[in-house]
Image (cartoon, grey):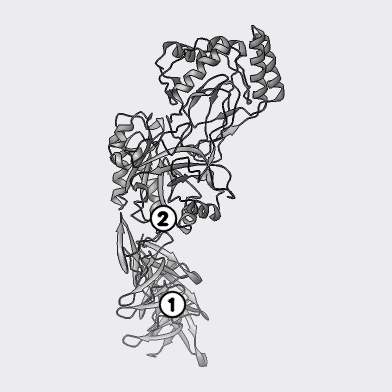
Amino acid sequence: MTFCSFVGSAIINDQIAHADTVTVAKTATTVTRTTVSADSKTSNDSASSDTVSTTANKVANTASNIAHQPNSAITNLNTSQAATATSSTTTKAASSILSQADSETANSNTSQAVTATSSAATEAVSSAANQTGQKVSSSNNKSHEATAHTTSAASGSINQVSSTAIKSATSTENTNKATSVASNAAKHQATTTKKADLNLTTVTASTPETDVWTIGDTTRPRVDVVDVASYQSAMTQSDYNKLKAAGVKTVIIKTTEGTGYTNPVALAQAKMANAAGLNVDFYHYATFNTADTAQMEATNMANFLVKNNVSKKVLLFADMEDAKTYTVNATANLNTFWSVLNALGYTNHGVYTSNTYLYRDAVIKTVGQSRVWRAQYPYTPSANNLWNTDDGAWQFSSTALLPSGSDYTGYIDVSICYNGLTEDSAGTNTFSTPNEFVNQYHWEGNKLYFYGSNGQPITGFRHYGNNKLEYYGSDHAQYRNRYLTAANNQLYYFGSNGDAITGLRHYANNKLEYYGTDHIQYRNRYATVGNNKLYYFGSNGDAISGLRHYGNNKLEFYGTDHIQYRNRYYTAAKNKLYYFGGNGDAITGLRHYGHNKLEYYGNDHVQYRNRYYTAAKNRLYYFGSNGDAISGLRHYGNNKLEFYGTD
């Protein structure tokens, strides 16, 4: 919220401290209530605003109640209520303004400037502003759901304001003042700022030149740190180079928010910062209010860190500002968040918060004051007036501009670091682990990584030992109990120890596959295993069972154990009998066996039964019901008789 003099300067501007984009402009007096409903998990946010405007007479009458000597006024953004100033008269006036704003709603997307005409009110609010002279940060919203939009006051609206102000003046002097204020309002745009999931009541007054300044201004506190999110995605490598040249040492980058959002440009931003010689830290925007959700949000951040091989030395901040995190268990919840990251080796922690965060001391307790990055904005930050010097770092402005000539022309958040906190990180080795793990394995949670001679985790195949093979995915984690299809459709399977298997692998419901000494799965080929057992693996890699026709009328058979039949019978459906020879092929023609026994298999490889067979030289055989060729007399038909010799 911003409480302002109606023709003078600000009393207190309690602004969104860490919105990814903040629009600041000189404004005429407005009474605005903005309701925002941000679409979750997207940085392309939409919002609707209800703008409420009151007439100059009402504002002037209300403002005339303001007393002259307020000691302080604090705004609570999370409840949209004005807190008590020392002067009760000031309190009543502020409450009256809020009450009038609430009672007069209108559906409009354009803020209308409303002028005050009472010189007494002007003097009262100006005096209060002089007593305070600063902006106080009550909430630093770094949410990817937060945006800022500026709407221009239409010329017709300005004319209406001017007309109303003049009519409400009770003297020539007041008329002149009202006309002057309305004329000033016509020169500038009204500004409304949206904050995700909050209802803001804003009272904005015509102010002196907006406090926008350029990094490198020696009258301001030293800029050691800038922080960015997806809203600064337009920054180029040249911009980061200019920050380095201007003396900036560290860039703190938003990685994640809640349980599912990841800043899509975080990786690119970090790499450009590193390339410019800037240290990189990361932060997570917290929304958790239970231990379970704290664990889930930590996992979200951890996924980004592990996937991108972020060094364990990198400093990680929990951004504790969202009202969703308000709970008496704030300390325990944040400690749960830290414990998940600790388990993965990320133990370098800090907390970002502001003075008006309800559980500020509770979350600071998890890291200690020296590791706090605190947001609090004076209206005009000065190099001669440093705040929060007992903290690790102080974020003192969100409306700084990059050095002249930069490609990015939007605002950026800036901070001063007092004790080296933000530099206690991995430097420019954000994505490397020099001298930490070289030519060795390293477990992170339940994932195994192998770091090569350059200290980087490897990807792809790694041959080692005596014909051993392992594989590391694009996330650098070793494959275990899973397949890999490589070039030329070659399939590998990596067992529970991470090694690519060789030989037979039984799986699922009596399925069998085979991997050669090169670890590649057999497909459309035989494999002889152990005691001359032959298998055939089909196009899907599975060992077949049953009959297999191949070649020129050749037939073989594989049992339920997938082993090829050799020198043995097989009875198929409809009592068809096959015999498979020493080479595994089903035979055709005559087969002598046993003690002068003879059987015959047709061209279809099926044994003859109860039927004749004429062989070469017109020799005739008869095969009985058991498949054997008969010898001796055979009665058949109507008193017919034939005879078969001992051959």
Label ID, residue 307: 2
Gap between marks 2 and 1 measured at Cα: 64 Å
In this view, the residue in front, 578 or 52, is 52
Name the side, left or right, on which 628 lies relative to 120: left
**Residue 434 % position (x, y):** 35, 64
In this figure, what is the number of numbered marks? 2
Identity, as a three-letter code, of the amino acid under mark 1: Gln
Q: Residue at 65% across / 7% down in the picture?
A: 171
In this view, the residue in front, 593 or 498, is 498
Up-down relation of residue 203 to residue 253 (above or below): above
Up-down relation of residue 575 to residue 200 (above or below): below
Up-down relation of residue 191 to residue 618 (above or below): above
Residue underneath mark 1: 607
Q: Residue at 59% across / 50% down in the picture?
A: 405
**Residue 413 % position (x, y):** 48, 41
User: Residue 208's quadrant in the figure?
Assistant: top right
In this view, the residue in front, 365 or 441, is 365
- In the orientation shown, which residue stands out farthest toward the bottom? 617
Q: Residue at 43% across / 66% down in the picture?
A: 573
User: Residue 288's quadrant in the figure?
Assistant: top left
- Mark 2 vs mark 1, foreground winner is 2
**Residue 402 % position (x, y):** 54, 46
